[in-house]
Image (cartoon, grey):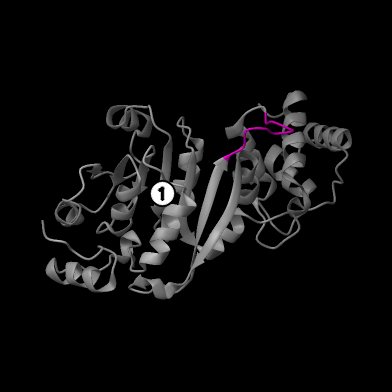
């Protein structure tokens, strides 16, 4: 069998693009990673072993897919661009532990697909270079779903990574930070410079690793309702928590009385701003509103 250079090597990537007359589609947020060291570091950050099943989102021409296949038990890739299917069929031909599905990850019935394509006897991880324009919907969709992942390791715009990992009373801290961190341990594994891609994006990227928290001091009465509540608390960044709660619950005398009662119970200053609250405080606040029959 002919030995080819790695798919993600600059020369081979360019040769594949030339052969198939491909160019990155801005509409799909396509950028091809051409740094093998970085790909190796992604696989390492995800701690992929031969026992792991891996879901990849947006394989592109197969650069990361190839490196995952070398380390994992099986790789299942979701590729939305049907023009890349024949490319992947050729580039990934040497590997018998890869399956590519032409489907939008946001529209897929992921639990059903996983049940059909995996045995369920292996740890399940998600590893992907996410398109910038739908990073947040994909991450939130994965976290809100029924599946439990051993780890989610994804590349995203550095700015979004900083929001995911932000702490209270800092500029990037917002609803996304609180919602994701309530459920997960979140860390930036490393930064990926824009020079590592063809074509080069306008910003740097970061590899973010999410692992589910196993022990939490406080637990929301309902994860989805909690997420909606936190978004409401951050509805207007420059307004106080009191004003945002009025916007969320309404400005009736009944709502004002209930908000005053709950804030007193949990000992949170109505004049505080949402970005000052810790995740535990948001959980306590949501649970207190629920216990008082206001948030159901």
Note whether residue 139 is visible. yes
Query: Most extreme residue toward the left, as rendered?
Result: 1
79 with respect to 170 (left or right): left
x and y, in percent, of residue 44 in the image: 45, 53
Please state, as top left, top right, bottom left or bottom right, where the N terminus lies in the image.
bottom left
Residue sitting nearer the eye, 13 or 109: 13
Q: Residue 109 magenta-drawn?
A: no
3 with respect to 73 (left or right): left
Residue at position x 68%, y 41% in the image = 248
Residue of label 1: 127
Instruction: Decide whether the magenta segment is chiefly helix, strand or loop.
Output: loop
Please state, as top left, top right, bottom left or bottom right, where the C terminus lies in the image.
top right
Residue sitting nearer the eye, 166 or 187: 187
56 with respect to 218 (left or right): left
Residue at position x 23%, y 74% in the image = 11
Residue at position x 26%, y 56% in the image = 62
x and y, in percent, of residue 295 in the image: 69, 29
Q: What is the quadrant of residue 169 in the picture?
A: bottom right
Q: What is the quadrant of residue 170 in the picture?
A: bottom right
In this rendering, is residue 202 above or below 113?
Answer: below
x and y, in percent, of residue 281 in the image: 77, 41
Circle 1 — which element?
Answer: strand
At label 1, counting other C-alpha atoms closer than 10 Å, the crowd grade (few under 14, some 14-19, many 20 or more) is many
Q: Which range of residues does the magenta coloring cover?
A: 212-220
x and y, in percent, of residue 208 in the image: 52, 54
In this rendering, is residue 161 above or below 69?
Answer: below
110 with respect to 277 (left or right): left
């Amino acid at each position: 069998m002919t030995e080819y250079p790695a798919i993600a090597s600059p020369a081979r990537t360019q040769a594949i693009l030339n052969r198939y007359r491909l160019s990155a589609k801005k509409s799909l947020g396509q950028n091809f990673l051409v740094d093998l060291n970085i790909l190796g570091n992604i696989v390492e950050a995800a701690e992929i072993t031969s026992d792991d099943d891996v879901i990849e989102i947006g394989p592109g021409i197969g650069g990361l897919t190839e490196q995952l296949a070398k380390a994992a038990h099986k790789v299942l890739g979701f590729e939305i661009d049907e023009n890349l299917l024949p490319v992947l069929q050729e580039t990934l031909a040497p590997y018998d532990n890869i399956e590519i599905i032409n489907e939008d990850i946001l529209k897929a019935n992921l639990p059903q697909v996983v049940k059909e394509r995996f045995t369920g006897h292996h740890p399940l991880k998600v590893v992907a270079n996410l398109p910038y324009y739908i990073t947040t919907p994909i991450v939130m969709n994965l976290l809100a779903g029924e599946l439990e992942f051993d780890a989610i390791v994804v590349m995203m715009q550095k700015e979004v990574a900083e929001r995911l990992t932000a702490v209270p009373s800092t500029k990037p801290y917002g609803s996304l930070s609180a919602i994701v961190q309530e459920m997960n341990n979140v860390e930036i594994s490393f930064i990926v410079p824009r020079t590592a891609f063809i074509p080069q994006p306008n910003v740097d990227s970061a590899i973010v690793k999410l692992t589910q928290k196993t022990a939490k001091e406080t637990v929301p009465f309902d994860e989805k309702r909690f997420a909606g509540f936190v978004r409401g608390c951050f509805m207007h960044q420059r307004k106080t928590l009191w004003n945002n709660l009025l916007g969320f619950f309404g400005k009736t005398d009944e709502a004002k009385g209930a908000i005053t009662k709950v804030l007193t119970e949990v000992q949170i200053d109505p004049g505080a701003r949402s970005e000052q609250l810790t995740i535990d405080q948001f959980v306590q606040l949501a649970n207190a509103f629920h216990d008082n029959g206001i948030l159901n």
